[in-house]
């Protein structure tokens, strides 16, 4: 079994000062970490890479400076392919837009789309695609509290847990 920490929308330093200790601990305990963008600064990306132990898949968000990250990437863990994108754009049509990106990028087999941008938790199916959004790891507005997800994957199966601070 592979344990994956899913975080995003940290927005440090523009909207938050730090990533909460409990989220750092979840990331440190994970086998791999996915960050859906909006780090806000190169220092924040470096910090997340450090406590993720180098096992980090990340994309750029609409509020990121030039961080040399892709806008869409994929990673496979435990027989599940994760298509990761920030989800930049209007809130209206968000789920359909992200599901379209996932469908374009996905290989054959179990696939999950992971995105951010809205700062709102999401675990839903849209157009036949399972979408996950971990909310904001720092509780940055418009979120009301710090949130993240963990996923346990094995043999193409996935079990997702929502964490709120």
Image: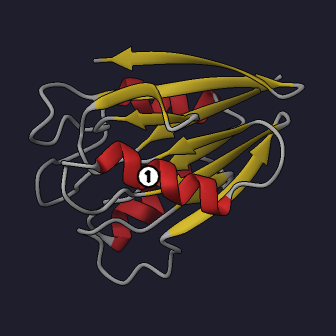
Q: As drawn, which residue projects farthest toward the right?
A: 155
Residue 26: percent from the left, percent from the top? 52, 26
Tell me if residue 89 comes above or below residue 7 in the rendering: below
Visible in this render: residue 9? no
User: For mark 1, what is the residue?
Assistant: 98
- Quick one: quadrant of the N terminus? top right
In the picture, measured across the screen, residue 49 lies left or right of residue 152, that is left
Label 1 SS: helix
Residue 66: percent from the left, percent from the top? 36, 84
Q: Quadrant of residue 143?
A: top left
Tally the numbered discs.
Answer: 1
Q: Name which residue lies at 11% across and 52% down.
A: 15
Mark 1 surroundings: few (<14), some (14-19) or many (≥20) residues within 10 A:
many
Q: Name which residue lies at 9% across and 39% down.
A: 142
- In the depicted view, which residue is nearer to us: 61 or 22? 61
In the picture, measured across the screen, residue 139 lies left or right of residue 111, that is left
Q: What sort of colour scheme is used for the picture?
A: secondary structure
- In the depicted view, which residue is nearer to us: 104 or 48? 104
Q: Name which residue lies at 30% across and 62% down.
A: 88
In the picture, measured across the screen, residue 160 lies left or right of residue 95, that is right
Visible in this render: residue 108? yes
- Quick one: quadrant of the C terminus? top left
- In the depicted view, which residue is nearer to us: 157 or 152? 157
Residue 162: percent from the left, percent from the top? 44, 17
Residue 24: percent from the left, percent from the top? 45, 34
Tell me if residue 51 comes above or below residue 70 in the rendering: above
Q: Quadrant of residue 122?
A: top left
Q: Name which residue lies at 25% across and 44% down.
A: 18
């Amino acid at each position: 079994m592979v344990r994956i920490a899913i975080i995003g929308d940290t927005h440090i330093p523009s909207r938050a000062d730090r990533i909460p200790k409990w989220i750092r601990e979840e990331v440190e305990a994970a086998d791999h970490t996915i960050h859906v963008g909006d780090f806000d600064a190169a220092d924040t990306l470096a910090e997340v890479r450090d406590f993720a132990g180098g096992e980090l898949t990340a994309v750029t968000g609409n509020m990121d400076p030039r961080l040399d990250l892709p806008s869409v990437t994929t990673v496979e863990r435990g027989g599940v392919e994760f298509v990761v994108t920030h989800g930049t754009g209007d809130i209206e049509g968000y789920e359909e837009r992200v599901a379209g990106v996932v469908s374009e990028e996905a290989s054959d087999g179990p696939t999950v789309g992971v995105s951010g941008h809205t700062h709102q938790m999401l675990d839903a199916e849209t157009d036949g695609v399972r979408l996950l959004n971990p909310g904001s790891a720092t509780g940055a507005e418009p979120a009301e509290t710090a949130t993240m997800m963990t996923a346990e994957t094995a043999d193409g199966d996935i079990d997702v847990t929502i964490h709120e601070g």
